[in-house]
Image (cartoon, rainbow, N blue to C red):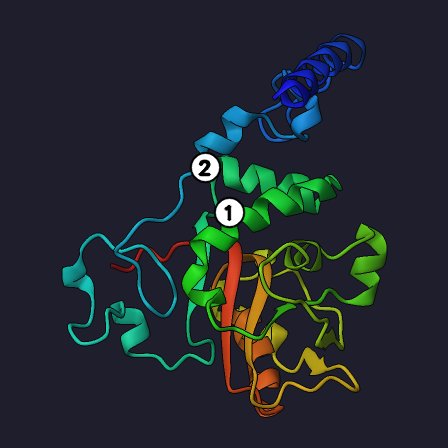
Amino acid sequence: MQNIVASAFSRKIIDSFLSIVLAPVCAACDHPLDEPTRGPVCQSCWQQIKPFTPPLCDVCGDPRQSWRTMSVEFNICPRCHHRQHLVSRARAVGEYDGTLRAVIHALKYDGHRSLARPLARLMTVAGASVLRDADVAVPVPLHRSRKRTRGFNQAAEIARYLAIPAIPALKRTRATTSQTDLPAEARHANVRNAFTLRRGVEVKGRVLVLVDDVSTTGATLEACAQVLLDAGAREVRALTAARVVSRLR
């Protein structure tokens, strides 16, 4: 007990010192950090993240307004009911908006790699059904030119902290235009044949979980799943920190 109290007191002293000397601000809201030793995002911002709550589509993970918008038999949204998916089940913490979007940007574009661990914790809770009985996590790869510029792959950083082992099973064979810069109908064509299985990787018969920071239309995840299924994977699921929610109810 004394050690815990001493540790808390020491942290408080260090936080006070850093706040005065360095005046750090939250990477998400730009307000002063009261507890910089807890990371670059303030506790208020973490608490503002709104996780998805049921009902959710069993396939894409989109939140639905009512169970009545689901297929009666499978709890699947109308869009997924009429479309075949290579990714059997996808989940995300919440919508790609507000504080969650700001946290992801702080990781991805501002180089705050320490945010990968708390994001992975949130994803572990949100994606419990995706991670259950899965063999390994597979981060969606960056092209080597983009990874060189950014210095790291945010998906691989997150995958390191999930509850299952992570392997770099995929390689991006060509640089592609950012999906956010393209209309929805062009995104599947943009990433088609952009990935391949790394030499020496064996996925036959395994249940794999693709990991990425954001899912927009799901085109990138589907392109990756195609490669893994063609290589003999038994099932491919997906887990992301956020997703762009379809407004089709």
Q: Quadrant of the N terminus?
A: top right
Q: Earlier in the sequence, mark 2 or mark 1?
A: 2
Q: What SS does tag 2 mark?
A: loop
Residue at (61, 68) in percent of width and height:
137
Percent across and percent down for residue 147 are: 80, 59
Q: Measured along the vertical axis of the image, is residue 230 above or below residue 49?
A: below
Residue under pointer 1: 122
Residue at (62, 30) in percent of width and height:
41
Amino acid under disc 2 = Ile
Residue under pointer 2: 49
Percent across and percent down for residue 110 are: 73, 39
Instruction: Tell me: 248 left or right of 50.
Output: left
Q: How many residues crowd around disc 1 within 10 Å: few (fewer than 14), some, or many (20 or more)?
A: some
Residue 180, quarter of the rendered image? bottom right
Percent across and percent down for residue 157 are: 70, 54
Amino acid under disc 1 = Leu
> Could you tell me how far apart the alpha carbons at marks 2 and 1 are, in whole angstroms?
10 Å
Percent across and percent down for residue 173 are: 76, 77
